[in-house]
Image: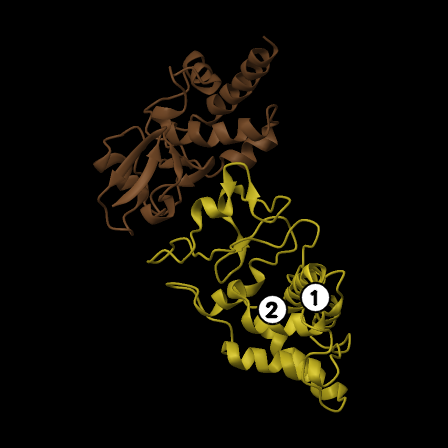
Chain colours: A brown, B yellow
Amino acid sequence: MITITVNGQQHDVDAEPNMPLLWVIRDILGLTGTKYGCGAAQCGACTVHLNGEAVRSCVTKINRAAGQNIVTIEGLSAHNNHPLQLAWNEMNVPQCGYCQSGQLMSAAVLLRENPNPTDQDIDDAMSGNICRCGTYQRIRSAIHKAAEMQTEGAKI
Amino acid sequence: MKKLIVISGMALIAGIITLSFRAEKAPANNYPTLPKDSAGSAKAFMSVYKVLMSPRCMNCHPSGNAPLQGDDSHIHTMNVTRGVDGKGIYSERCSNCHQAENAAGLHMPPGNPKWGLPPANMRMVFQGRTPRQLALQLLDPKQNGGRTKAQLIDHMANDDLVGWAWHPGDGRTLPPMSRPAFAAQVRLWIAKGAYAPSAKTK
């Protein structure tokens, strides 16, 4: 048994230590918001937070996550109201949507560490997340929007 | 009597602390020496240089702020950058993709617990350096991470991340000689006087 905490909830998982974290999240815990894209850490669709870092869960073995804190898209906010989720909604960012949970999880790390990112900062943070629909311009706009919302929220 | 025990105890603790620091930092002259031989030393360095300039070593010692990939040493995809600590930035930290060990299969992320570039304040660039430039850089504690010659030998011969170059995972070529042979050339270079090749050497 391997114990992991996912979105604040502790789970004892009966899994082989080399099983990818992504399989545990999707197939054992049933949290299917995180997507399988390439299986080679090339596309970013499977991005989740491991102790706050945006790891690619397709190449991260479950034994690395043992006893650690994992946050998936389902746990990014309590009521789907993270500034990024609000901005994503407002700007109609997704097209097919497949990559978007990974995009949001990567963007959340960027905004946590840099509340007012420039276009270059966004390029530096987000180039590991590929969107086959090419929604990059809307992703960029929504990150700027979310940064504004986050700053406004902090003032209140 | 009580006082004596307390003083002895403190002396013992101080001794242990001192020894533990000594264990971390090898004494400056703790390496084998041979009669000085500038030609032999520089020749040994040229073997060392060939290894350091192989993609397995140079790809993480780039002249820019992005790591390199592949045997053609192209710039790492995904706009990856060094960051202050050499471990990447934001959602593109090295360990977000690179695990503690190589992932199996062609074109999968290689791995090591210490995966990363040298930090921004100690960039230790190999790419583009001539043999002379690289030799002088490696010997300069201000440019080599504060290492003495003994520590430099230890780093080349025993460091785990350096050792990854000889276990690089599927599809990656190895440096041009074995690690023991490489370490022997490093020792020889330093034992014979740690001479830098002449500026004309390519």
Q: Number of callouts in the render?
A: 2
Q: In the image, residue B164 lies at what x, y percent?
A: 48, 65
What number is the disc on residue B188? none
Residue A88 x %, y %: 43, 18
Residue B153's spot in the image, x, y percent? 63, 74
- Crowding near the residue tagged with mark 1, few <14, some 14–19, many ≥20 C-alpha atoms within 10 Å: many
Above/below status of B46 relative to A134:
below
Amino acid at circle 1: Arg
Q: Nearer the viewer, residue A79 or B182?
A: A79
Considering only vertical position in the picture, is B118 above or below A116?
below
For the residue marked with disc 2, what is the amino acid?
His
Q: CA distance from mark 2 to mark 1?
A: 9 Å
- Parent chain of label 2: B
Both marks 2 and 1 on one chain? yes
Residue A134 x/y as whole percent? 41, 29
Compared to residue A82, the image places residue B143 above or below, namely below
Looking at the rendered structure, the secondary structure element under dot 1 is loop
Marks 2 and 1 close (CB-CB < 8 Å): yes
Side of A66 where B89 appears, left or right:
right
Q: Quadrant of the C terminus of chain B?
A: bottom right
Q: Earlier in the sequence, mark 2 or mark 1?
A: 1
Q: For the point 58% across and 54% down, which residue is it?
A: B117
Residue B47 left/right relative to A14 = right
Depth check: A95 or A21 in front? Answer: A21
Judging by the rendered image, the residue that carries numbered circle 2 is B155
